[in-house]
Amino acid sequence: MRRPLLLASLIVIAAASLAVAQAPPDLSGSWRLNADASDVGGTGGGEGDAPRGPMGGFGMPGRQPMGGFGSPGGMGGAGLPVDPETRKQRMELLRELLEPVRRFTIVQDAAVVAFTFEDGRTVRYRTNGRTEKHQATNGTVETETRWKKGRLVRETHLDDGVSIEETFAITSPRGLAVEIEVSGGAGRRKPLRRVYDPVD
């Protein structure tokens, strides 16, 4: 009788240890952009441009026009010309999503990670990897969010084939690093790295 009980106990302990080992890191807290350690990017301005807040994520549009993205030659997904107003809206949406976020707060549980920005907006992402729709200031986007190798990965897809992949990771000493890669469209842009310090 003791052997089955011992075996069952070992299985429970092993399962609990595995669950702890696979638990995602805790990103919760308030975070402030460390501009000196970050690639500002996303504004089309020079390296000395200071971020304006509240911006980024699903915030307000940036300042300068951006080039290199969108459908090649101003063509739509079906090969049809895109009217100037639609193209302008797409560029503003992309600029909005790439603008550095000056400060935000993260709250997470087993299924959802929520970002709250300085203007009071809260955007919640389910971490099951399924497609969700979110309303940004300049349009609607689709996102897929998941935990991958101890990091939170959020993919944002625009309707012209451009996608933005953001990877959130805790650094040591405690900080938050965000790696940003943009793909698709008519150009390439080098990855961006944003560094955030905890706010007491």
Image (cartoon, rainbow, N blue to C red):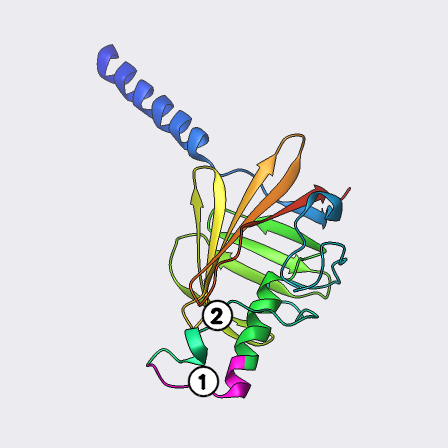
In the rendered view, tell whether residue 86 sits above or below residue 154: below
| Amino acid type for the residue under numbered disc 2 | Val
- Residue 43 spot, x, y in % from top left: 66, 64
Of the 4 image quadrants, the one containing the N terminus is top left
Q: Mark 1 = which residue?
A: 82
The residues colored magenta run: 79-87
Neighbourhood count class around disc 1 (C-alpha, 10 Å): few under 14, some 14–19, many 20 upward: some
Among the two numbered marks 1 and 2 on one chain, the one whose residue lies closer to the N terminus: 1
Badge 1 marks a residue whose secondary structure is loop
Neighbourhood count class around disc 2 (C-alpha, 10 Å): few under 14, some 14–19, many 20 upward: some
Residue visible at 59% across and 61% down?
98
Q: Is residue 88 magenta?
A: no
Camera-nearest label, 1 or 2:
1
Q: Mark 2 = which residue?
A: 141
Rounded to the nearest whole Å, what is the CA distance between mark 1 and mark 2? 18 Å
In the rendered view, tell whether residue 22 sits above or below residue 125: above
Left or right: residue 143 versus residue 114 is: left
Left or right: residue 79 versus residue 58 is: left
Residue visible at 36% across and 78% down?
77
167, 18: nearer the viewer? 167
